[in-house]
Image: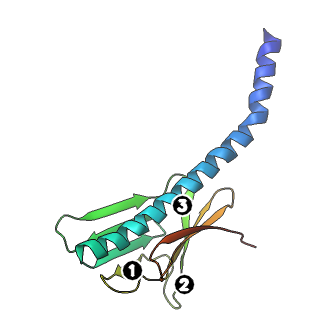
Amino acid sequence: MVVVVAIIALIVGISFPAASAGLENVRMVSAGDSVAAFLNGAVNRAERHQQPVELVISRKDGTLMLYSNEPGFSRELKMPDGVSIEAVLPVEEGIDPTLPRRILFLPGATVPAIGIQLSNRRNTHRLVRLDPMTGFPRIEAVSVQ
């Protein structure tokens, strides 16, 4: 019985790092998809309702929030455990990067060319960019040196 328990413990010990790495990767992909859908929702809401929509990105809290003039409308997206907002691009000079970043989507206007860079504990990075020509978000893997 002790031998069987030792073999099971060995198998679990060997497979745990691979399983946790896979879980971290799933969280990162899920966070990137969620941010892309959230940004797409902001663009669509501004166009369909013909109302300005404000996007507030808080790196410190790891959240994205949407607000509009419509009473009671607000949406919030919180990053999953282990995934953080590393940067909001383009970086504004002279502004404290820890303060929330506010971006306005106006109906009929060009979509802001922004990017939200995500990172996780395993130093994996993803960049979600809004294409100003099409208004659609793209997710890119980023290698940081």
- Picture quadrant of residue 41: bottom left
> Label 3: which residue?
32
* Residue 140 relative to residue 59: left or right: right
Between the C-alphas of marks 1 and 2, the distance is: 13 Å
Query: Mark 1 or mark 3, which is nearer the start of the sequence?
Result: 3
Q: Residues within 10 Å of mark 1 (few under 14, many from 20)?
A: some
Location of the C terminus by quadrant is bottom right
Q: Residue at x 62, y 45 (%)?
A: 23
> Considering only vertical position in the picture, is 93 above or below 8?
below
Between the C-alphas of marks 3 and 1, the distance is: 19 Å
**Amino acid type of disc 2?**
Val
Q: Residue at x 40, y 60 (%)?
A: 77
For the question of whether residue 62 can be seen, the reply is no
> Considering only vertical position in the picture, is 137 above or below 27?
below
Q: Residues within 10 Å of mark 2 (few under 14, many from 20)?
A: few
Q: Residue furthest front?
A: 134
